[in-house]
Amino acid sequence: MSSNYKELAALLGSKMKNFKTEIPETMQGFTQMAAATHSDGALSKKNKELIAMAIGVAVRCQGCIAFHAQACVKMGVTRAEFEEMLQVAIYMGGGPSVMTAAEALAAYEEFGGEKAAS
C-alpha cells in the first residue's frame, strides 16, 4: 500500500505526460475517450467518477485510486457517498477489494476528503 497518494499521483502524472510525445495517437484517443465519458448525461459526472473509483478498487489499481480519489474530493463527494461506492466495489471485487478499499479511503482522506467522525 502506498503511504502517499499525492506523491503517487504526481509521479504517475509526470510519466503519463511523456506518453503524449512518445505514444501520441494512443494518448489522444485516451484523452478523447475520457472527455466523452466525464460529462453530465443520464449519469452525473460525480456518479461516473464514483464508478471509475469503484472499478479502480475492484481491479486493485493504486494509480487509479490516487487519481480518482483526488477527483472525488474536487467534485465534492461526501464520505458517505464514498463509503457506499466502496461497498459496491467490495461486493464486486471480493476479499482483495476490501484491502484496496482501505487504500482508497486513505487516498480520499489524503487529498482532503472527510475524515471519520471520532
Image (cartoon, rainbow, N blue to C red):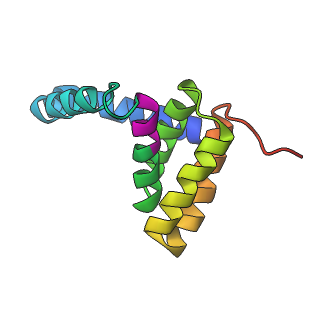
Residue 27: which quarter of the image?
Answer: top left
Dominant SS of magenta comes to helix
For the record, the magenta segment spans 45-50
Residue 76 visible within the image: yes
- Residue 70 lies, in percent from the top left, at 54, 33
> Is residue 113 placed above or below 52 in the rendered structure?
above
Residue drawn where x is 35% and y is 25% of the image: 40
Outermost residue, left direction? 25
- Residue 50 lies, in percent from the top left, at 47, 42
Residue 1 visible within the image: no
Outermost residue, right direction? 118
Residue drawn where x is 53% and y is 26% of the image: 75
Q: Answer whether residue 48 is magenta in the image.
A: yes
Q: Is residue 20 left or right of residue 60?
A: left
> Is residue 15 placed above or below 91 in the rendered structure?
above
> Is residue 93 placed above or below 61 in the rendered structure?
below
Quadrant, the N terminus: bottom right
Q: Nearer the viewer, residue 20 or 48?
A: 48
Say how many tags the image has: 0
Q: Answer whether residue 69 is magenta in the image.
A: no
Q: Nearer the viewer, residue 73 or 51?
A: 51
Q: Is residue 20 left or right of residue 59?
A: left
Outermost residue, bottom direction? 95
- Residue 56 lies, in percent from the top left, at 42, 52
- Residue 90 lies, in percent from the top left, at 52, 64
Q: Nearer the viewer, residue 116 or 13?
A: 116
Residue drawn where x is 44% and y is 37% of the image: 47
Residue 45: which quarter of the image?
Answer: top left
Q: Is residue 69 left or right of residue 61?
A: right
